[in-house]
Amino acid sequence: MIDLSKRVAVITGGASGIARAVARQLGREGIRAIGLVDFSEAVHGVSAEINKYLGRDCVIPFCGDVTDRAFRTSVFAEMKRRYGGVQLCVPAAGIVRDGLAVRVDKATKTAKLYDQDLMEKTISVNLVAAAYWAMETIASVAECRAQAGLGGWKGGDEVQGEIVFIGSISSAGNKGQVAYAATKAGLEGVQSTLAKEAIYYGMRVAIVHPGFTDTPMVRAMDPKIIEDTVLPRTQLGRLLAPEEIADAICFMIKNPAVSGALWADAGWHPPA
Ligand SMILES: NC(=O)c1ccc[n+]([C@@H]2O[C@H](COP(=O)([O-])OP(=O)(O)OC[C@H]3O[C@@H](n4cnc5c(N)ncnc54)[C@H](O)[C@@H]3O)[C@@H](O)[C@H]2O)c1
């Protein structure tokens, strides 16, 4: 099993939901330090609350937008200054902007396309930023290895790391989610490519696909849709708890035999 006390993590979207639960669990399981990132000021209070719960100063808050390149490099620079580098990343910051791909206005009988600005915004946060925070983590490990005179990873040394992307059941396509589904399917391509490249540095790159989870993101959706179309068809008959997804992510991080994709969806997939 991976020794978390040797890991420094960056977790984005950490002021809320799944990422906050991941930070709590990694902290409880002994991780050395976590840079917790969110554009909500709440990230400060959440970090303080987790540190209090852990009884040690493990979580450092960073408030900013994950799509801001200068902010991203400043977070990694500060974590390097404090801890020598980052080896673990869960780039969880995400947004959902639902809408049909094509909608016909009943009165005018004209068709309207899904807003292209929303498509680009969703891709920028969920896909491009997630890819670059992960790549920054691989770069951190690669530099440490180069500076320690280590070549390609052959096992046995400790300069390695893990990345877990957060996909979604919507990566398989879901009505009303053309933008969101595109980003989560896109992450599968990023994950499988980075997995092939980063193993050179001893890094595993995985993706978890959660089902509907009880977070502010889902609470903002129409509860009737979830109650009528989702919950009756899941094994649990309720929303997943953020802690259940966090547990799946921590399992993927800790068990070195695990890579690739894991579906944590209580058995539900979007219907046609
Ligand atoms: N809740 C679900 O049912 C579900 C299912 C599948 C996948 N996911 C994915 O899990 C991840 C976490 O979602 P969640 O449900 O915990 O949602 P959430 O809304 O509780 O948390 C998302 C966090 O991301 C932050 N964020 C959004 N855009 C940001 C930006 N540009 N810069 C910095 N921070 C930003 C928000 O402030 C928020 O704190 C997302 O990637 C989401 O797509 C969620």
Image (cartoon, rainbow, N blue to C red):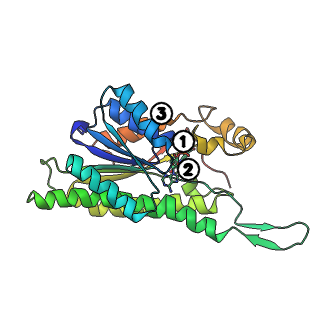
Mark 2 in CB contact with mark 1 (< 8 angstroms): yes
> Residue tagged by mark 3?
243
Element assignment for label 1: loop
Mark 1: C-beta under 8 Å from nearest atom of ligand 1: no
**Residue sitting nearer the eye, 38 or 217:** 38
| Residue at the (60%, 58%) spot, across then down | 173
| Residue at the (44%, 40%) spot, across then down | 44
CA distance separating discs 1 and 3 = 13 Å
Q: Where does the image place residue 154, in percent across and percent down from the top left? A: 14, 54
CA distance separating discs 2 and 1 = 7 Å
Element assignment for label 2: helix
The residue mark sitting in front, 2 or 3, is: 3
Q: Where does the image place residue 27, in percent across and percent down from the top left? A: 33, 33
Tell which circle, 1 or 3, labels the residue nearer the N-terminal end: 3
Q: Residues within 10 Å of mark 1 (few under 14, many from 20)?
A: many
| Mark linked to residue 265 | 1
Q: Is residue 155 visible?
A: yes
| Mark linked to residue 169 | 2
The quadrant of the picture occupied by the N terminus is: top left
**Left or right: where does residue 221 sit relative to residue 1?**
right
Element assignment for label 3: helix
